[in-house]
Amino acid sequence: MSYFFQLLVSGIVVGSVYALAALGFVLIYKASRVINFAHGHFIAIGAFTAYALSTSLGLSVWIAAVLALAFTAIVGYFTERIFLKPLVGQPIISVIMVTIGLASVFGGLIHMTPYGSGNFSLPGFLPEGGVNFAGISVSYPQLLAVVFTGVFLAAFGWFFQRSTVGIAMRAVADDQMASMSLGVSVEKVFALAWAAAGITAAAAGLIVGAISGLNLEGLVGIGLKVFPVVILGGLDSIPGAVVGGIIIGILENMAAGYLDAYIPGGGTGDVFPFLVLLLVLWFKPHGLFGTEEIERV
Amino acid sequence: MKNKWTLWALAAVLVMGFATAEKVHIMWSGAITGPTSDAGKYYAQGIEDYCSWVNDTGYVSGIEFVCETRDDQYNNANTLRNFEEAVDRGDPVFLGYSTGGTLQLKPLVQEVGLPFIPASYHIGNIDPPDNDYIFLPIASYSEQVIAVLEYIAKVSPGAKVALAIHPSPFGRAPVKDAKKAAGELGIEIVEVQEMAKGLDYTATLKRFEKKGVQYIVYQNVAGPVANMIKDAGRLGLKIKHAGAHYAGGPDLLRLAGDAAEGFLWVTAYYMPHEQGAGAKFVKDLGAKYGRPADAIESVHYPSGMLAAAIAIEAIKEAKNAGKKINAENVYQALLKMNWQNKLAVGPVTYSKKDHVGVDKLRVLEARGGTFVPVTEPFSSALFRKVHYGE
């Protein structure tokens, strides 16, 4: 039974990382209906900025992390101002192509730094080992992932429910024209959503870096994992991103733990979540918590 | 006054030499960016620096080498384009990289007859058909894994082993031979698990533990291996870890830290921290061309050097024999090669039937943050039997 619980806990932990990565994606979609294919590169920018600051300037990882969150937020803000703002009102395919192009541009820019290829490890900022309880083990970086996800979920929950800007963002997501008529700056809301997405992406990058080291391919790959998470949870649902992330994490671990032994070569952990995803989408095409949009003809 | 004239004469000879030197192009196509670029980046630097050293020292008189390292991003289509360009230009030799790219190019390499030296040590590269022009710098992945299995069988008779491999032709390369060898050695391969780079390997490791696995042997790159051995340490598993050439090395130590302690690693290359001419040569070259410490310490740096060195040595032989520098003459020189190099633990020898350069390997163990040899250079006793049935 401890085997099952170890897989379950590991799945929740991994799922928390996916959830954290997915939060930024959902924030952008929720506010502006833009699907950001460059999200993985924001994760990489945040992680490598923290690494560069801590190793080149000798800053503590915690200070470097705060600066990296701020820097990635700025990158997100100006990305929206420069590249996305001119596309307001344009066909969705144009916007998608721009974000795909942004992914290539960011990838190219990262390759121009010393971090484009190779493996890097953040300087140790957490104790070695982890927490063991009833035969279940969780490392400190993994625990930090759970804490970060919880903190960001709570912060964004408060932000969208209580703060003026958050309420404005929800209003824009619901009806841009109505929001504008009430004096909400839609452009400002879009830019803030990208900045907030930059913060969560950087946080996810830091956690991934602490758990498995920094590698451009790996970090961008986490950005791709976001897609099944948000489709499962609902593209515009923040709680959905968290639940979707954790479900995908658990499914990966359970499949790897129980099915891999019966499949030559294993690898079911990478495939099984997508099978479940297909099943869910059959019955709930907007995801578990996504807004059902009904168009009347 | 006499010294002055001597200096002028020397300068004139050098200028004339460069003016008349034949330019020979050597192209490498590999992953400087993209998947496995953590290895490819340093491999490329090794090629560049060895070529620079050869040119700077006039190692091959009358030839100026133009070495190009092209980034194919681990994309076979890009490798093909680069290879075709080298063929069209009349390059006498080509340096390759990935397993997939090499396997895909085999028929074309055979058709055009251009000697090809890959970074991939997949035995399938030099197995028939279309295998005449491909030369492995060191022993194959199959031989590396069998060598480490032989070592495991010696220190832990009857051990239960799991293979954790990269999900690609590179990873799968040694599996068949390893299974056959395990049967001969009296050890059991209980599972073969393909593992991509992931955030958590708890499920795989706990499953291995349930099956009584004592050793995990990796045919993978250092990143996923580091994560897996760190997870094993966190879970308190007593499983030992071992790996082939690309799985270990200083990169693994840097990524895994203390968790790498005890890791058994098979390679043919000397380590930079070792005493000896090879290690000194690598360090001196790295320093001369301004490479950072992580490049000089990486095993991929001398690996790239060796690939370039083999190509240049063959060209040198062809030149010394008074032959034109072309693919056929370089091929003939490779077939006769018996070169005592400084970079690896054995000589580079090829023949019509033998397309493996360095036949010797060593097992090294991570101790105190460095890899220490625990065997003398040896050739696998079983490899030829299980692979060729000899």
Image (spheres, coloured by chain):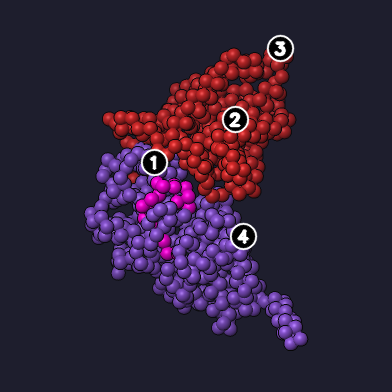
Chain colours: A red, B purple
Residue position for label 1: B231
Q: Classify mark 4: residues with Cα within 10 Å, few (<14), some (14-19) or many (20+).
A: few
Q: Chain of mark 1?
A: B
Magenta residues? B251-270
- Could one spot residue A89 in this view of the protein? yes
Type of amino acid under label 4 = Gly
In the rendered structure, find residue A199 and report the number of the disc placed on it. 2
Camera-nearest residue between B373 and A25: B373
**Are tags 1 and 3 found on a single chain?**
no
Quadrant of image for the C terminus of chain A: top right
Which percent across, then down, holds residue B355?
Answer: 43, 70
Camera-nearest residue between B223 and B6: B6
Which of the two marks, 1 or 3, is nearer to us in this view?
A: 1
Type of amino acid under label 2 = Ile
Type of amino acid under label 1 = Asp
At x 45%, y 72%, the residue is B348
Mark 2 vs mark 3, CA separation in Å:
28 Å
Mark 3 vs mark 4, CA separation in Å:
61 Å
Element type where label 2 sits in the image: helix
Element type where label 1 sits in the image: helix
User: Which quadrant holds residue B47?
Assistant: bottom right
Q: Chain of mark 3?
A: A
Report whether B378 appears left or right of B67: left
Mark 1 vs mark 4, CA separation in Å:
36 Å
